[in-house]
Image (cartoon, rainbow, N blue to C red):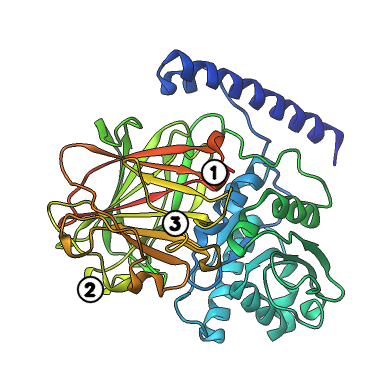
Amino acid sequence: MPRRRRICLILAVLATAAACSGSASQRASGADPGTFAREIARPAAPPDAARLPILFVPGNLGSGDQFGVQAQRFTSNGYPADRIAAFDYDASDPEPPAERIFTGLDTEIARLLTLSGRKAVDLVGQAEGADLAVRYLASTPARAARVAHLVSVAGPQPAGPPRGVRTLAVWGIGDPTRRIAGAQNARFPTDDRGELLASTGTFKQMYQFLTGEQPFTTEVTDQAGPIELGGRVVLYPANAGGGPARLELYRVDPRTGRRLASGLRSFVNLPPDGTFGPLRADGTASYEFAVIHPGEPVQHFYYQPFRRSDRLIRLLTSKPAEEIGGGMTASPRQTNLVVSRGQEWQGDQSRTSDQLTVDGHGVLNPANTPRSKLTLRVFLFDQGADGVTDLAAPLPFYFAVGFVTGADLFIPAGDRSVAVTMTPRGVAAGRTTVQVPAWPSSTDRISVRFRDDTF
């Protein structure tokens, strides 16, 4: 790495550390975090225009936001945010039509090459997405020539790197003998597929493989100044475009989840493919996205502060008659929640189970979130609208869906806030709470998305 760039990065990391220390003091004093953000800059690594674009391909029932935390780690190390993209396809089909997907990959790679002025991209695939990436490269020499590196996370075992494209294979839990001959193979034998994709260990392997250098940081560092938010509204799990619709972005009070006075920051009339952004935002603030389809319930999405620009946001929506698991019971008396993150929820580990509480009620247990379920999304609602909570067994129509579970939890709707608290792997230091308004489920749906770098 050139000496000048190395010095710049060291100074950026030191400045970030100093700013984070100041941030903790500011929170303790109760000062307005927005004021603090204006007073103290928190620089990140300077963008490096020489970096190749990175394109992520998710696995079955996945979407582009699963690569979000890794994208932010890359940008914390100097990757331009607009050069990291994700390719969405119909991930509800276990055997999607390959050639249609390959044509879509052609288009997205061409876009990234035009944007960056580079001659090749780096391709990252997870599980079934890695299998598609391998088959894509093997399909024609011209396609392989536009890809400099392949990273396969929990993917297949081809006989060797497809058409000689340099390959890193990252393996998690399972058969310890898996490998791709002629590729670089890295192993994290205790990680399930979601955790493997989001881990700092995988990031370090990817960064070194793609750049030939060690990263300066494996953290998501705070970005100085305004950030940009972008992505897609999609119909889950087909990942079809969620437009046309209206998308509204609100700044909310983190203590209640309620919209601040004059809190509307942006609004967008979504095109059919659901793309939006970049929208200007503040990395220290809490936000709500609201997706409005005429005649349908409003779908609200609540996030922890983003900290950095994020171009891989995926707002997973559904039509009322096409909801996964058959649809949640709706009633003006109750609030319905969908809580998600990119690493699996585990409710059956003796000492390291995740804890997810809603208004103080623990909802995860060995029955509804065993480790083997690989749960990423938890659907919480009052089955039958009887006002009774029953967490003894999972809701079968949700538990039968891959990476999803459901629990019968009565959450009263009304003029109040609901506290949704995650304690990852039972570690109290990582405990995080997102407050949301208790919207009635007859007119409103709520999703909460926790960050993946809180472990």
Other residues around mark 2 within 10 Å, as few (<14) / some (14–19) / many (≥20): few
Circle 2: residue type: Ala
Looking at the image, is mark 3 or mark 1 earlier in the sequence?
Answer: 3
The quadrant where residue 174 appears: bottom right
| C-alpha separation, residue under disc 1 versus residue under disc 2 | 37 Å
x%, y% of residue 161?
80, 76
Looking at the image, is mark 3 or mark 2 earlier in the sequence?
Answer: 2
Q: Residue drawn at (42%, 70%), measured in percent from left and top?
A: 239
Left or right position of 243 against 231: left
Can you identify the residue that label 3 sits on? 365
Can you identify the residue that label 2 sits on? 321
x%, y% of residue 103?
55, 80
Q: Secondary structure at mark 2?
A: helix
Circle 1: residue type: Gly
x%, y% of residue 127?
62, 72
Task: Tell me the number on the disc at residue 51.
Answer: none
| C-alpha separation, residue under disc 3 versus residue under disc 2 | 29 Å
Q: Secondary structure at mark 3?
A: loop
Foreground mark, 3 or 2, reads 3
Other residues around mark 1 within 10 Å, as few (<14) / some (14–19) / many (≥20): some
Looking at the image, is mark 1 or mark 2 earlier in the sequence?
Answer: 2
Q: Residue drawn at (28%, 33%), measured in percent from left and top?
A: 263
Task: Tell me the number on the disc at residue 426.
Answer: 1
Q: Nearer the viewer, residue 92 or 40?
A: 92
The quadrant where residue 153 appears: bottom right
Point out the residue furthest to the top here: 29
Quadrant containing the N terminus is top right
| C-alpha separation, residue under disc 3 versus residue under disc 1 | 13 Å
The quadrant where residue 115 appears: bottom right
Q: Secondary structure at mark 1?
A: helix
Circle 3: residue type: Asn
